[in-house]
Image (cartoon, rainbow, N blue to C red):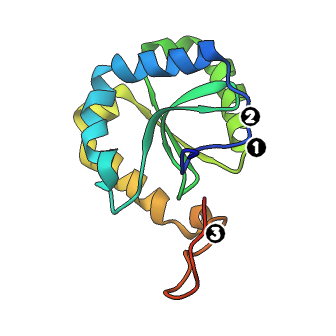
């Protein structure tokens, strides 16, 4: 049975798949702070995945329902702004919204970070591309 709620139709190399698995096992301190609030549908019922492969990139967190990518930026991102901008452009071309937070924001103001993520999940502009679930009696559908 294929996995649900992931970006489908992309070719993923074994090397990239292994890298994503390693990143899930070796989360940064800030990812470890944020993940308990996102996992298991804890943020207003939205399902997030961590270290999701999109195109040829691995994003920190991904919510299929809200078409949302969350990236946490540490010091290394100061030196790779052009790369991050190009990467964001490619990811956004998939119809995804990208939220970037500095590590310091997660450490110092987690409530504001969570509020921003929740707002993006509930934002009509984000949700407008997501079809409504079927009403009772209309059957089910695969996503």
Quadrant for residue 91, please give it: top right
The disc placed on residue 141 is none
Q: Residue at x 73, y 35 (%)?
A: 10
Q: Is residue 57 visible?
A: yes
Q: Residue at x 40, y 58 (%)?
A: 46
Distance, label 3 to label 1, CA atoms, is 16 Å
Pointer 3 or 1: first along the chain: 1
Quadrant for residue 86, please give it: top right
**Badge 2 element:** helix
**Percent x, y of residue 102:** 41, 29
Whether pointer 1 and pointer 2 mark residues with C-beta atoms closer than 8 Å, the reply is yes
Q: Identify residue for label 2.
A: 90
Q: Is residue 74 visible?
A: no
- Front residue of 49/134: it is 134
Crowding near pointer 1: few (<14 within 10 Å), some, many (20+)? Answer: few
Distance, label 1 to label 2, CA atoms, is 5 Å
**Percent x, y of residue 140:** 56, 73
The image shows residue 71, relative to residue 93, as above or below, that is above
Q: Identify residue for label 1.
A: 93
- Front residue of 82/38: it is 38
Q: In this view, which residue lies farthest toward the front?
A: 1
**Horizontal side of residue 9 vs 143, given as left or right:** right
Crowding near pointer 2: few (<14 within 10 Å), some, many (20+)? Answer: some
Q: Identify residue for label 3.
A: 128
Whether pointer 3 and pointer 1 mark residues with C-beta atoms closer than 8 Å, the reply is no
Pointer 3 or 2: first along the chain: 2
- Front residue of 34/3: it is 3
**Badge 1 element:** loop
**Badge 3 element:** loop
**Horizontal side of residue 101 vs 55, given as left or right:** left
């Amino acid at each position: 049975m294929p996995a649900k709620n992931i970006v489908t139709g992309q070719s993923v190399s074994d090397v990239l798949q292994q890298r994503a698995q390693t990143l899930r096992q070796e989360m940064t301190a800030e990812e470890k702070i944020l993940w308990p609030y996102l996992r298991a549908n804890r943020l207003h019922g939205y399902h997030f995945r961590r270290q999701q492969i999109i195109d040829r990139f691995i994003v920190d967190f991904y919510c299929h329902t809200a078409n949302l990518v969350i990236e946490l930026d540490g010091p290394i991102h100061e030196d790779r702004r052009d790369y991050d901008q190009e990467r964001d452009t490619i990811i956004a071309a998939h119809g995804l919204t990208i939220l970037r937070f500095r590590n310091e924001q997660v450490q110092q103001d987690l409530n504001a970070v969570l509020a921003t993520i929740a707002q993006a999940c509930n934002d009509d502009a984000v949700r407008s591309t997501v079809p409504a679930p079927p009403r009772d009696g209309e059957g089910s559908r695969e996503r």
